[in-house]
Image: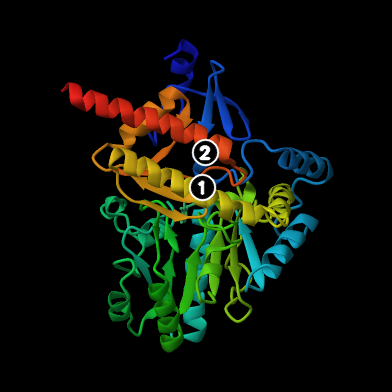
Amino acid sequence: METYLQEKTQHIMPITPRPDICFIKGDGHYLFDQTGKAYLDLVQGWAVNTLGHSPTVIQQALQIQSQKLLNPGPAFYNQPMLDLAQTLCQHSVFDQAFFANSGAEANEGAIKLARKWGQKHKQGAFKIITFDNGFHGRTLATMSATGKAEFAPLFEPKVSGFKKVPFNNLSATEQAVDNHTVAIMLELVQGEAGVVPANTDFVEGIAQLCKQHNLLLIIDEVQTGVARTGSLFAYQQYPITPDIMTLGKGLGGGVPISALLVSQTVSCFDYGDQGGTFNGNPLMCAVANAVLSEVLSPNFIPHIQEISLYFQQALINLSETFDLGEARGKGLLLALDSGRYSAPEIVHQARALGLLLNAPRENTLRFMPALTIDKTEIDKGVAMLHSIFSSLIARAARR
Ligand SMILES: Cc1ncc(COP(=O)(O)O)c(C=O)c1O
């Protein structure tokens, strides 16, 4: 490691293993490290940079808004906040938005709102059904809601009131409902679990369960929202009308903003129940407005649908050539089962070649490129993967 990195990294709290590189610049589909080396980025800040690195529209939105107003405080309206709430409500089934700074914070708000609604409208019902391998964030309540086995022993005692059931299993979900249940909360594509889509029958059945038992349907679209799966919101691909939806990641195109969206009938916070110093600040809302105006332009979503098919076919071809596993996902939230090859090892080799990938599981590679990606970049990334698998095979043959 270079000396200057060595000296400085010791002051960063080690919460994740980080490679010995420091990114200096981003441009579209590429990141550049301290040596000037370029990396084709198919991770994009974990599905965050909707329009790629430092797009002009975000630069402009930041510049214009920063010259006007940074933060009047969350207890006042501001123009970008009003515009953003209106756009999100006009393009969804929801009536009101609360803005926050991270996906976990939006989900924490969803959990609080469901409990408040249970107190007001369902005799104090408070339990929320969530799913094995689901991921909802790293605050104490959202870690408690999360179904990652690794989280189970951490930070005990957790927030109580979450009942976890197997994903895509309707009868287990039905059996988990009791008189104290207030809501069912799920991702429509479990991202951190390795890109596992929810079956349509399962989601439809859950929506019916919610109607039957007077439960709130909470959809966590922190990863799937803002066109990531090929529709503005993933719930639009299922025959459901959620009561609550959370957004994060792609909404800000790289800056921290998230949203909690609700229908009028469910909105029930009293003054003081929810808030936060930076919530709805005009700088971040102006960026989200700029992102949405691109995403809502006529050719944007059709491009994702088209390029998704191209990318999926390229992954299927790779799988057939190297005898790997399934290629799956929706839109530009895709995964490839790396079969007998270790996905973290592939990520490591790819980075050395100048390709950034993610491995949420031992045998899963995840692809979350900018939604503006085109065939040229996909071909480049797939060619690099091709050479990695070829060298892994050659290495195995030498043993
Ligand atoms: C589905 C889902 N919910 C919530 C979160 C947490 O979001 P954040 O990391 O912004 O708190 C994530 C992050 O990966 C996520 O994928």
The quadrant of the picture occupied by the N terminus is top left
Residue 193 in sight here: yes
120 or 201: nearer the eye? 201
The quadrant of the picture occupied by the C terminus is top left
Q: Around disc 2, counting alpha carbons within 10 Å, would you say few (fewer than 14), some (14 to 19), or many (20 or more)?
A: some
Q: Is residue 131 above or below residue 93?
A: above
* Residue at x 63%, y 59% (from the top left corner): 99
* Residue at x 40%, y 33% (from the top left corner): 385
Dot label at residue 80: none
- Name the side, left or right, on which 2 lies relative to 25: left
Q: Is residue 32 above or below residue 164?
A: above
Instruction: Identify the mark nearer the N-term, 1 or 2.
Output: 1
Check disc 2 and report the residue beneath it: 378
213 or 361: nearer the eye? 361
Q: Is residue 208 above or below residue 8?
A: below
Residue 299 on image: x %, y %: 69, 54
Residue 101 in sight here: no
Task: Quadrant for residue 292, please give it.
Answer: bottom right
Check disc 1 and report the residue beneath it: 310
- Secondary element type, mark 1: helix
233 or 311: nearer the eye? 311
- Secondary element type, mark 2: helix
Q: Are marks 1 and 2 in contact (CB under 8 Å)?
A: yes
Amino acid type, callout 1: Tyr
Residue 68 on image: x %, y %: 84, 45
Amino acid type, callout 2: Ile
